Amino acid sequence: MKVLKAIYNFIVGDMIILIGILAVVVILALFEFVSALNSLVVASGVILVLAVLGVLVTTLSREARGK
């Protein structure tokens, strides 16, 4: 179990990052597969960058405040 936790901490580092990035990927996938959201595909790159920055800022501010 320690090996799995060490691998997880090396790759992800924080659960907020993992959940946030997975949520962004799911939302961007919905843009592609749901025809009503198809017009948002043009802005998917900007949405991806802003969402990843938001997730990283959230994680950084949580770490700065302390647990």
Image (spheres, rainbow, N blue to C red):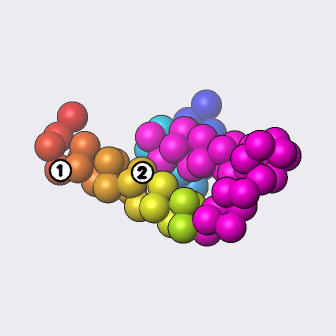
Quarter of the image for the N terminus: give it.
top right
Position of residue 25 in the picture relative to residue 60 (left or right): right
Chain part drawn in magenta: 16-45
Report if residue 38 is visible in the image. Answer: yes
Residue at figure coordinates x 14%, y 43% from the top left: 65
Sequence-wise first label, 1 or 2: 2
Q: Which residue is mark 1?
A: 64
Q: Is residue 22 above or below residue 54?
A: above
Q: How many marks?
A: 2
Query: Which residue is identified by label 2?
Result: 55
Q: Nearer the viewer, residue 46 or 20?
A: 46
Residue at the extreme left: 65
Q: Nearer the viewer, mark 1 or mark 2?
A: 2
Circle 2: residue type: Val
Q: Position of residue 59 (x, y in %)?
A: 34, 48
User: Is the residue marked by circle 1 packed among few (<14), some (14-19), or many (20+) residues within 10 Å?
Assistant: few
Q: Please tell me which residue lies in front, 60 or 5.
A: 60
Asked if residue 46 is among those painted magenta in the image, a careful observer would answer no
Q: Amino acid at mark 1?
A: Ala
Could you say where residue 36 lies in the image, as x and y percent from the top left? 77, 43
Query: From mark 1 to mark 2, how far is it between C-alphas?
Result: 14 Å
Judge whether residue 41 is colored magenta: yes
Q: Nearer the viewer, residue 11 or 57?
A: 57
